[in-house]
Image (cartoon, rainbow, N blue to C red):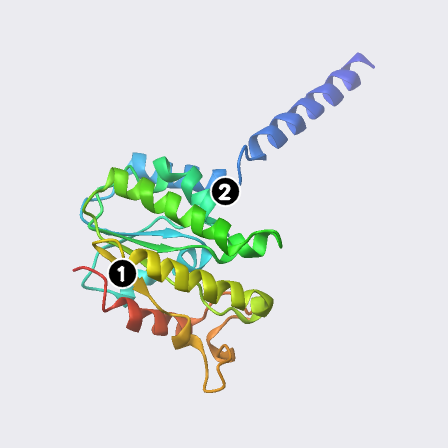
């Protein structure tokens, strides 16, 4: 009897420990820890183009093949928001000595809640930009516009307004670029091209990334 009780208690302890280990203190914590582990094993070389932001960069697994003449360090994670990137800035931005920083983020901020306004996203973006500038005073920063995802048609007006405000903000800052992929991803009717997205109508296939390559080719440093 005592043996059965002991085994039951041991099983419960293992379950509790496993759950505690798997539970993240913050969203995307585990993904960021993988970056840190990789850095500990082999720290990235300096003077790379640092990609940060959300899943459209995360899922660009073969990004280096699109830009063979550049060295790309991809530290984008999950479905992150600008707030998430700000939270993890000491882990995915500040440890490195990048040649250039490229941001794709903001789309998920609006998707996370109907209460998220353009003004709030602008506040988050300027906060992130100011943190980057405080750390890297002269490193060029490029922002890739929010894309017209078909699954988020109800948010496109917010995307367009926020894109324009970010573009205007960056126009006042030296060593910056605004990369407009939004308009390049529309068809002749002004609608998102259906054949450049995966089945989820949110993330892109190779055709979509080919459009991004054309736009980024003009601003990425060699």
Q: Mark 1 sits on what residue?
A: 177
- Please name the residue shown 30% across and 38% down the image: 94
Residue 113, position as x, y percentages in the image:
61, 52
Secondary structure of the residue carrying tag 1 is strand
Residue 73, position as x, y percentages in the image:
29, 51
Q: Tell which of 39 and 201 is nearer to you.
A: 201
Badge 1 or badge 2: first in the primary sequence: 2
Secondary structure of the residue carrying tag 2 is loop
- Please name the residue shown 47% across and 64% down the image: 161
Marks 1 and 2 sit apart, C-alpha to C-alpha, by 28 Å
Residue 70 visible: yes
Residue 43 visible: no
The label on residue 18 is none
Residue 136, position as x, y percentages in the image:
23, 42
Q: Residue furthest bottom?
A: 188
Q: Tell which of 126 and 39 is nearer to you.
A: 126
96, above or below 15, in the image: below
Mark 1 neighbour class, 10 Å CA radius: few under 14, some 14 to 19, many 20 or more: many
Q: Tell me, yes or no, whether the two marked residues, 1 and 2, touch with CB atoms within 8 Å.
A: no
Residue 222, position as x, y percentages in the image:
16, 60
- Please name the residue shown 23% across and 64% down the image: 219
Q: Mark 2 sits on what residue?
A: 28
- Please name the residue shown 48% across and 79% down the image: 193
Tag nearer the camera, 1 or 2: 1
């Amino acid at each position: 009897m005592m043996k059965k009780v002991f085994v039951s208690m041991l099983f419960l302890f293992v379950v509790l420990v496993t759950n505690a280990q798997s539970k993240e203190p913050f969203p995307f914590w585990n993904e960021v820890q993988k970056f840190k582990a990789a850095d500990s094993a082999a720290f990235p070389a300096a003077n790379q183009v640092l990609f940060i932001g959300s899943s459209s960069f995360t899922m660009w697994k073969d990004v280096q093949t699109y830009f063979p003449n550049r060295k790309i360090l991809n530290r984008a994670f999950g479905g992150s928001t600008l707030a998430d990137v700000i939270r993890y800035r000491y882990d995915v931005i500040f440890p490195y000595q990048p040649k250039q920083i490229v941001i794709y983020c903001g789309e998920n901020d609006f998707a996370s809640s109907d209460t998220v306004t353009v003004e709030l996203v602008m506040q988050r973006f300027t906060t992130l930009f100011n943190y980057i500038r405080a750390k890297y005073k002269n490193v060029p920063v490029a922002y890739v516009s929010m894309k017209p995802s078909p699954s988020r048609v109800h948010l496109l007006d917010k995307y367009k307004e926020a894109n324009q405000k970010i573009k205007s903000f960056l126009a006042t800052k030296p060593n910056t670029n605004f990369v407009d992929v939004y308009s390049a991803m529309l068809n002749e009717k002004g609608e998102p091209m259906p054949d450049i997205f995966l089945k989820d109508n949110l993330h892109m296939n190779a055709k979509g990334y080919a459009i991004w390559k054309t736009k980024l080719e003009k601003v990425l440093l060699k």
